[in-house]
Image (cartoon, rainbow, N blue to C red):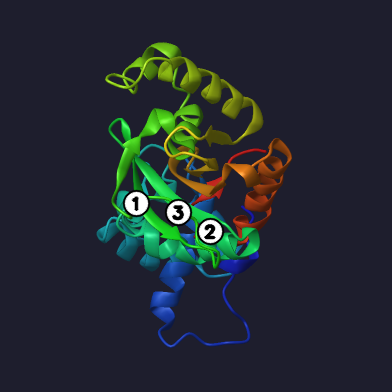
Amino acid sequence: MTIPETTQPASTATSPVEAIDRALVVLEALACGGAQGVQLADLAAGLGLNKTTVHRSLAALKFRGFASQDPASGAYLLGAAAVALGDRFLSEDNLPALLHPALLALSTASGELVHLGVLSGTHIVYLDKVEPERSVRVYSAVGRRNPAATTALGRALLAARGTDRASLRGYTVGLADGVEERAWHALEAARDRGYAVEERENEPDISCVAVPLFRSGQPVAAVSITAPAERMSPERVGELHSLIRSTLPDLLPGGLGLGAA
């Protein structure tokens, strides 16, 4: 087993509480072990610790549900409590605080309005927004809901989810004639390009470009850049998409990422 460098016990510094530090190092190693798990001997060898020490740490982690053991192979795996901890950290309640620095950087780099949103039923809910220095008159208060099928944020998430034409109809019930057709073409284009757009569909003279954010391969939120339509030529939209992809990765919290370009 190869242990990542960040998981190796520190040789030049001493942890204030070595037993806790060892348990955390073991936990990080289990996270790298994947679904097959890791044998005790491999863990000890990879971490440069003796098996008795590692076994004690594993016993404590198992007691709290942060580690489990395959009864057939004896291999140790990451436990459900560790997964739940990550889920709570990246919950919708925490996303605005976790992602605000990334939104701020993106707004500064683009000079435009930036939104964070998630799907809620058939709608998008705005969780956070960052205004540029030059104001953009857009009614997008945090907590407001808009139909997912008519927004770039919603289209980015629906496209990433693999929403088919039949399923899309459920997102357009009660909306104006032609919305389903436009939304379907927008989803197909979003899957090809890696980003979704919306042009003047929610507010006059306002357009958006959005990308989904993924956790464990599943789309969980989306980020958009909104600007007056006169500034959103196809070339500018492409530039903003490139800016999103170059700005966000280093600022996203662990566990969240962009999809393939």
Q: Is residue 60 left or right of residue 54?
A: left
Which image quarter holds the C terminus?
A: top right
Which label belongs to residue 252?
2
Q: Secondary structure at mark 1?
A: helix
Q: Secondary structure at mark 3?
A: loop
Report the residue at 50% width, 67% height from top: 101
Residue type, mark 3 in image: Arg
- Disc 3 designates what residue? 137
In the depicted view, which residue is nearer to us: 59 or 217?
Answer: 217
Give me the C-alpha separation between circle 2 and circle 1: 15 Å
Q: Given this view, does label 1 or label 3 mark the residue nearer the observer?
A: 3
Give me the C-alpha separation between circle 1 and circle 3: 35 Å
Note whether residue 151 is visible: yes
Q: Given this view, does label 2 or label 3 mark the residue nearer the observer?
A: 3
Residue type, mark 1 in image: Asp
Which label belongs to residue 87?
1
Q: Is residue 216 left or right of residue 232?
A: left
Note whether residue 55 is visible: no
